[in-house]
Image: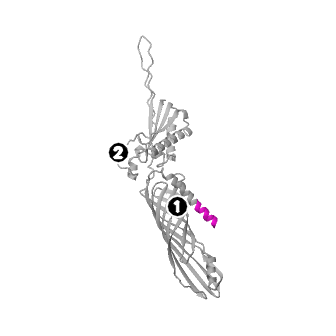
Amino acid sequence: MKQSMHALRLLGLAGLGSLLAFAANAEDTGYFYAGGSIGQSRARIDEDRINASLLAGGLTTTSMSKDEHDIGYKLFGGYQINRYVGLEGGYFSLGKFGFTSTTVPAGTLAGQIKLQGLNLDLVGSLPLGDRWAVLGRVGAQYARAKDRFSSTGAVTVANPNPSKSALNYKFGAGLQYEVNPSFLVRAEAERYRVDDAVGNRGDVNLFSVSLVFPFGRTPAAAPPRPVAVAPAYVAPPPPAPAPIVVAAAPVAPVVAPPARLRVSFSADSLFAFDKSEIRPQGKADLDRFAKDLAGTRYDTIGVTGHTDRLGSNAYNQRLSTARADAVKAYLVQSGGIDAAKISAVGHGETEPLTKTEECKGSKPTPKLIECLQPDRRVDVEVTGTR
């Protein structure tokens, strides 16, 4: 028990520490949420303390039955400050636990404790990809313990219904899975420090599953849609025929400049929002582009990533560069394009297609994100001829 308790405490603190380290660089994606949890709560009845108390009254315990498990639940709400840190408060009920002791001289002592209260936690999350995240939490909880005792025979109880409220700590750790932007599922293990009304101090563990419902969170990426030109590749026009020069003296031949082709892919069709891993639909679009490009004699291919204006300049620059590098790597690995002829660069938010008066605001609301969709793109420019 002591080893598992120590491991749980270390896991919660270590997870939270890692999460807080990321918070300073997090993009602002705040939203409110609410939810509920249900699971099994576990306590430990202090059998030695009860036996000692009876013995002090001249009674010897001959047997004891204990109920150390019950159903616990939570109702909570919170605010996700950014993708790494949130603040959460709520109501919890840890259930009821009890015992029955049989004594000599003949008698019985039955006791039951009910625990419920309010909590306020700092919750950290460390993403493990697009959908999974590790959770860690620490906080304060104000629990009310209601005891009830009854006796028969030689056992007497001075105060049958004592109660006590106390402020203590709690902590926990778990996993979270994002079903979609409006529905999350959590599995957590938490430990509550509690004091009862007769001087006992102990821990109650709650192992629960939670359903979480965010409000006003960024919607899922829109269906693939090209911004400037449809993803379908349009072959460049054939080069102009060589001019006929009539002159007595030889002249230098006229060379037509290499044809250029520019295709713009919507970043929302290639990537999930705020991500740089190419989605299956995006891979299909790039596969079609590489197939259409087969047989083309080209000199260079330039890949340029762009973002909208939400977030910091430095963050958008990193995201646009990572997306351009991802498209380049995929075209080289899966499209068979010569790596020496393809380059990738990120321009961040410096070349928007939208106008400020058309897309007003600075907070990442669903309406503004949709309006700025044309700015999130990856341009591919091919220089060459058939």
Q: CA distance from mark 2 to mark 1?
A: 40 Å
User: Between residues 161 and 58, which one lies in front from this camera angle?
Assistant: 58
User: Between residues 366 and 333, which one lies in front from this camera angle?
Assistant: 366
Q: Taking 14 as reference, is 156 above or below it? A: below
What SS does tag 1 mark? strand
For residue 246, which numbered disc appears in the image? none
Residue numbers of the magenta segment:
1-10
For residue 137, which numbered disc appears in the image? 1
The nearer-to-camera label among 2 and 1 is 1
Residue 131 in view in this figure: no
Residue under numbered circle 2: 356
Amino acid type, label 2? Thr
Within-10-Å neighbours for mark 2: few <14, some 14–19, many 20+? few
User: Between residues 374 and 160, which one lies in front from this camera angle?
Assistant: 160
Q: Name the residue rendered at 64%, 85% in the picture.
A: 59
User: Between residues 17 and 386, which one lies in front from this camera angle?
Assistant: 17
Secondary structure predominantly adopted by residues drawn in magenta: helix
Which percent across, then down, holds residue 153?
60, 89
